[in-house]
Image (cartoon, helix red, strand yellow):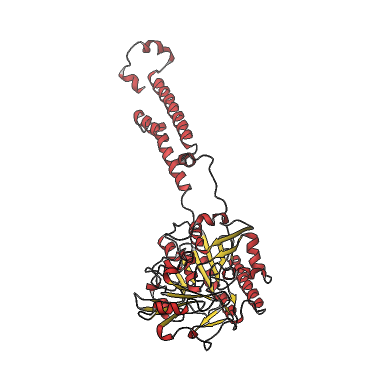
Amino acid sequence: MLSCLLRGGCSPRLCLWALLLLPLVSLHTLNQHGRRSHGVNERPKLLLVSFDGFRWDYINRVPTPNFHNIMDNGVIVEHVENVYITKTYPNHYSLVTGLYAETHGIVANEMYDPVLNRSFSMETDSVYESRWWEAAVPLWVSIQKAGGRSGAAMWPGSDVKIHGMFPNKYLLYNASVSFETRVERLIEWFSAPKEAAVDFGVLYWEEPDESGHNLGPESPLMDVVIAGIDEKLGFLMNELKKARLYENVNLIVTSDHGMTQLSSDKIIELDEYVSRDLYTWVDKSPVVALLPKEGKLDEIYQKLVDVNPNMVVYKKEDVPEHFHYQHNVRIMPILIAAKEGWTIMQNRTGPFMLGNHGFDNNLISMQPVFVARGPAFRKHYIKTSMRSVDLYPLMCHILSIPPLPNNGSLLNVQDLLYPEPTVSTPSPAPRVYVYSYAPVVGSFLGVAMVLGFLCFYIRQVTVKQLPSLKHRSREMSQPLLQEDLHL
């Protein structure tokens, strides 16, 4: 436009208006650029790993250099209160929904729904029926609805179509698939081209839970198993480093529950107290769920309530509130909770395990490990305690998605994160940060250009109207002649 003016291709009036508007156009451009520069950044990355049955104190039982590497460069929570009952399926679903079992509906590994008249068991294909899972929305569904992508390697429930969605990438559960293969798949998904890469991943491994059941957590043979888990964690960390993901991915390593030692000397046989004809056995020890035959509830309760000091018998409505284990039709009318270290069986002919979980979630033996590192987390930070349901809002915060209603609280765990920048005054003034000095600079330049143009314009007109200095005084006292305009 300025070149047009200097060439004389625009009328003086048109150019004057153009120059007056130029500062406003420049300001608009600067403002738009300022907004773009504060646009949405690439979504943060998060990988959640669960080593089933990894008790909180295992990391100090034998040398675990990889766990300690994460602790030294990240955070550790010494005591995590998981949800009741402390079994695999309820707790894994709580980790990714932030809900107690009574709310998300996966109340046990074995359960019965009287409304559906269907049974659920982790040992059968019933786990793939969507209706068991849809009282809640797991995080992998939420992030996909928010425009992100997810990947799941064997996490309980992740190979089920929930609210019409699978994870973008997932593996059908197969216990024979090695940990290393699961890790390699996740690395591929995180390393994919930007438009296809996952933002949130979940990884599950069956150990040390299986060994804890078979050997008992106090067995010296568990030392090798625990050391092996640390080596697997080291493999994961090295693969992330080789893929240049380690510094960019937030890594959380936790578990669903702990493990406690059992003894064949601590068995309660229900057949000694009540006939099997009066009930259906739904879920097994240590929290036995009984479905009484019609009209037999009170009779069963009276036969069991005070017969053995090593178990507590509840009617469903009398389960203590702090367990959050009443308000779901899948919780049976009678629950029998064994004291720590005890096993409830119908009789001794059934299989017996040397280690188990499922007990009171306030017991320290039921608490899982929790360590984390990455760009979102503080370094070398120790937190005394948290609740497992608090993990969900924490992960939503890291992933920059709004959490759905949940039983957790970000405030309870926000200290695990790097403190966010604070502003010195509470008054909202976003334009100061967005526009900076652009309006002042733009206005100054615009005024300067207008003044420059006016000076140029006046000079040019004056020169054209005054052909010579010797006629200047006379022509100023007379009207300009037509021919003078074209000299």
Q: Quadrant of residue 326?
A: bottom left
As drawn, is 391 to the left or to the right of 12? right
Q: Position of residue 440 (x, y in %)?
A: 47, 33
- The correct choice, above or below, for 250 with respect to 291 in the image is above
- The correct choice, above or below, for 419 with respect to 265 in the image is above
- The correct choice, above or below, for 480 with respect to 128 in the image is above
Report how many numbered discs are placed on residues in the image.
0
Residue sitting at the far right? 63
Q: Which quarter of the image is occupied by the N terminus?
A: top left
Foreground residue, 312 or 31? 312
Q: Position of residue 123 (x, y in %)?
A: 46, 81
Residue sitting at the far bottom? 349
Foreground residue, 178 or 365? 365
As drawn, is 341 to the left or to the right of 193? right
As drawn, is 223 to the left or to the right of 356? right
Q: Quadrant of residue 184?
A: bottom right
Residue sitting at the far left? 482
The answer to whether residue 192 shows anywhere in this view is no
Q: Position of residue 69 (x, y in %)?
A: 65, 64
The answer to whether residue 190 shows anywhere in this view is yes
Q: Which quarter of the image is occupied by the C terminus?
A: top left
Foreground residue, 158 or 354? 354
Q: Position of residue 66 (x, y in %)?
A: 64, 67
Residue placed at 66% from the left, 77% from the top? 224
Residue placed at 65% from the left, 79% from the top? 219
Foreground residue, 446 or 476? 446
